[in-house]
Amino acid sequence: MTDSNQLGRPTAAFVGASWFILVLGTAVYMIGLSNADMELNEQGYYLTVFLFGLFAAVSLQKAVRDRAENIPVTGLYIGIAWFSLLASLTLLAVGLWNAGMLLSEKGFYGVSFAMSLFAVIAVQKNVRDLAAWNAAHPGYQQRDSSKVSGD
């Protein structure tokens, strides 16, 4: 990576869209889960797989980014992060495959899970990019169009 790529400030539109998709994907998954006609232990299974997947995705993204920025990360940790992400995807797939749901319900959970995984990676990247950019540009303030200049 070049310095310009690492220190680029994400646009407000991308940051906002990332957060919106994360909230939307999570809300859709949780609303679907709360309205599902399944036992409490099944709902707990899908909730745990969802949270595990989000954490694994963030952990993997951070480890890969650390390594790209020459921050030491052990191969063991990256291997565990990959395993965790793949395990969460496998657990969701096996759970949905064996569930007594309509195919449309299964697709609903799969799409909202995938959407949330993508969004949580984008949000984590934006948070880290903004922190790096702010550290490289101390004292910078975005121009506020609501203030009148000339004072």
Image (cartoon, rainbow, N blue to C red):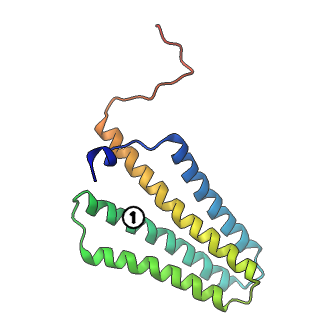
- Secondary structure under tag 1 reads helix
Residue 144 screen position, x and y as percent? 51, 24
- Quadrant where the N terminus sits is bottom left
Q: Residue at x 59, y 71 (%)?
A: 113
Residue 62 screen position, x and y as percent? 36, 62
Q: What residue type is labelled 1?
A: Gln
The 10 Å Cα crowd at callout 1, few under 14, some 14 to 19, many 20 or more, is many
Residue 132 screen position, x and y as percent? 33, 45
Report the residue that reaches farthest toward the top: 151
Determine the image quadrant of residue 64: bottom left
Q: Which residue is drawn at 47% across and 7% down?
A: 150
Residue nearest the observer in this picture, 143 or 41: 143
Q: On the picture, is 33 further left or further right than 5?
A: right
Residue nearest the observer in this picture, 111 or 77: 111
Q: Compared to 30, does 85 lie above or below?
A: below
Q: Compared to 65, does 98 lie above or below?
A: below
Q: Which residue is drawn at 58% across and 58% down?
A: 22
Q: What residue does disc 1 label?
A: 61
Q: Compared to 14, does 113 lie above or below?
A: below
What is the number of callouts on the image?
1
Q: Which residue is drawn at 27% across and 60% down?
A: 68
Q: On the picture, is 127 further left or further right than 22?
A: left
Residue 42 screen position, x and y as percent? 66, 85
Determine the image quadrant of residue 75: bottom left
Q: On the picture, is 111 further left or further right than 10?
A: right
Q: On the picture, is 74 further left or further right than 133?
A: left
